[in-house]
Image (cartoon, helix red, strand yellow):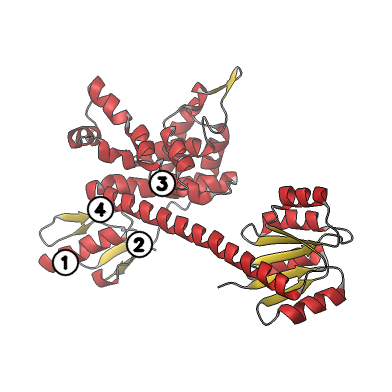
Amino acid sequence: MNNRILLVDDDYDILSAYKRNLRRDFEISTASSGIEGIERIRESEPYAVIVSDYNMPKMNGIEFLSLVRKTSPDSVRVMLTGYADLETAIEAVNQGNVFRFLTKPVNTESFINSLSDCCTQYQLITAEHELLDKTLKGSIKVFIDILTFTNPLIFNLSSRYRTMAKKIGEAIGIRKLWEVEIAALLSQIGIITIPTEIIEKKSRGESLSPDEEKIYLSQSENSRNLLKNIPRLEEIANAIQFQDRNYNEFFTESKTLSEEEFPIISRILKAAIDYENSIQRGLNQVEALKFLKQMSHKYDPDVLDALEKVITGVRIERMMKQIRLKDIRISMVIAEDIKDDKGNILLRKGYEITDVLLLRLMNASKVRSIIEPIFIFE
């Protein structure tokens, strides 16, 4: 259990007394100003509780805890003051999201009990985050495994979408890159709701009937419906729903949509998916970029500019190396088709190895001979 406490007060004698009285129950750090307190937070492991005096020069307790709220949002915040003032207390709660407000002088037993309650609150906060993370990662893995089993080709394309979308996001300066990556990786999950015969016709380049086309185009909406109720995937689900939208349909001189109506992640997905699909059809990088620029009205200009920067900075030639089948690891990218001794293709060039594909490959090696060495990209 994290019992690390940061005490901030400009009175050295008070800090010394706190440290002496609390050190048996908690791991105590001290700072004599708000500025020093922020430095300690940034340079150390997370604090469970941060306690600040209200009346300090240069930066008072409310200003300090407001910064703490941004710098260390999970830390439980406590305000100490020499006088009970309702207006100050309300301001501390509103601006610093203070969990507890204590009036000086506070006796040692009460202080220990209050800090223990704060540590318990910190455990609840971090436990909830961990549960959400595990739920999120588990849900994503299930969907990826389903897509890998039902349509390995689509999964491989989704992996390429993720790589390109991440590069575009980095070029633009997107803060939550993980959302861009997950959105791209799950962008085609709705394909599992589409009848196999329609998917096969589409992959062969055959024309679809109006009804079939309508069903096929419903996959983005279906993807959203599959993902929208998973904690922390709500925005990603919304972005996937709008990934097929053309920029010019929603951004004109007379009409501008909000970020919620046409998220930046949707616009990144539109460019990344169309670019990678062009590569899949046989165009090289320069030709694919030119193809998209000829239809520039479909894309966010900033996204298209970012894509061009990414493409012009990409090494087209990739180095290959040979390995044994037993040395294949997750995240490796296959450089040449993996075949058995009868010429059957087990995994195609360009596939990124997942735990599911690795298991499938190892199981196949138990019942048939796989040609070695295996070629992967470095």
Question: Do the numbered discs 3 and 1 sit on residues whose CB atoms are within 8 Å?
Answer: no
Task: Please name the amino acid that badge 1 sits on.
Answer: Ser
> Does 372 sit above or below residue 243?
below
Q: Please tell me whether mark 3 or mark 4 is closer to you in this view.
A: 3
Task: Tell which of 171 and 94 is nearer to you.
Answer: 94
* Residue name at image x 46 percent, y 41 percent: 234
**Which residue in the protein does label 2 denote?**
332
Who is closer to the viewer here, 119 or 158? Answer: 119
Q: Earlier in the sequence, mark 3 or mark 4?
A: 3
Residue 158 lies, in percent from the top left, at 36, 46
Mark 1 or mark 2: whose residue is earlier in sequence: 2
Assess disc 1: are there few (<14), some (14-19) or many (≥20) residues with their C-alpha within 10 Å of its C-alpha: some
Left or right for 79, reference 219: right
* Alpha-carbon span between mark 1 and mark 2: 18 Å
Q: Are marks 4 and 2 in contact (CB under 8 Å)?
A: no
Residue 230: give its label: 3
Mark 2: amino acid: Met
Q: Are marks 1 and 2 in contact (CB under 8 Å)?
A: no
| Residue type highlighted by circle 3 | Ile
How far apart are the alpha carbons under marks 4 and 1?
Answer: 16 Å
Q: Circle 4 is placed at which residue position?
A: 348
Of the numbered discs 4 and 2, the one sitting upstream in the chain is 2
Q: Read off the residue under disc 1.
A: 365
Asked if residue 138 can be seen in this view, the reply is: yes
Q: Mark 3: which secondary structure?
A: loop
Circle 4: residue type:
Arg
Spatial distance from mark 2 to mark 3, Cα to Cα?
A: 29 Å
Picture quadrant of residue 81: bottom right
Which of the image's four quarters has the N terminus? bottom right
